[in-house]
Image (cartoon, rainbow, N blue to C red):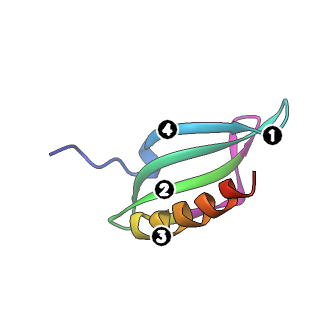
C-alpha cells in the first residue's frame, strides 16, 4: 500500500499547464481531509493562488467525461 501524501506535504505533481511566463496551473494528487483528491490550482511565481479547484476521485471521473465531450469539438 502506498503512503497517502497530504497537500501540505507536497502531494504528487501530475502535470503543469503554463499560462504565461509567470503563471501556471499545477495538477497535484494528494489527500485533503482524509479524502484522496486532485487539486488543479493556478500558481504565480511558484506560489499558490486562490484560483483553482479540488475534486475527489469520483468527481474527477465526471470531469473526464466532460473533457471527452470537449475533445470531440476539435
As drawn, the label of residue 13 is 4
Q: Is residue 39 within the magenta segment?
A: no
- Marks 1 and 4, the one that precedes in the sequence: 4
Task: Residue under label 3, please give it.
Answer: 59
Q: Residue, x 23% and y 45% (percent of image)? A: 3
Q: Separation of disc 2 and disc 3 at Cα?
A: 9 Å
Mark identifier at residue 38: 2
Please report the residue visible at 69 percent of the width from the left and 60 percent of the height from the top. Answer: 70
In front of the other: 59 or 41: 59
Badge nearest the viewer, 2 or 3: 3
Q: First in sequence, mark 2 or 1: give its number.
A: 1
Residue 41 in the image: above or below residue 64: above
Say few, some or many: other residues with alpha carbon within 10 Å of mark 4 (under 14 / 14 to 19 / 20 or more).
few
Q: Within 10 Å of the Cα at label 3, are there few (<14), some (14-19), or many (20+) other Cα atoms?
A: few
The residue carrying mark 1 is 19
Q: Identify the secondary structure beneath mark 4.
A: strand
Which portion, as a residue range, is magenta? 43-54
Q: CA–CA distance between discs 3 and 1?
A: 24 Å
**Is 49 above or below relative to 61?**
above
- Looking at the image, is mark 3 or mark 4 nearer the viewer? 3
Q: Is residue 10 visible?
A: no
Give the residue displayed 43% in from the left and 44% down from the top.
Answer: 11
Image coordinates of residue 43 in percent, x first then y, are: 71, 44
List x then y, in percent, for residue 10.
46, 41
Amino acid at each position: 500500500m502506498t503512503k497517502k501524501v497530504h497537500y501540505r506535504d507536497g502531494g504528487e505533481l501530475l502535470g503543469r499547464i503554463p499560462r504565461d511566463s509567470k503563471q501556471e496551473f499545477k495538477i497535484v494528487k494528494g489527500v485533503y481531509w482524509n479524502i484522496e483528491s486532485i487539486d488543479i490550482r493556478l500558481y504565480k511565481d511558484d506560489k499558490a493562488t486562490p484560483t483553482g479547484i479540488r475534486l475527489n476521485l469520483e468527481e474527477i471521473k465526471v470531469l473526464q467525461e466532460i473533457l471527452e465531450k470537449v475533445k470531440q469539438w476539435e
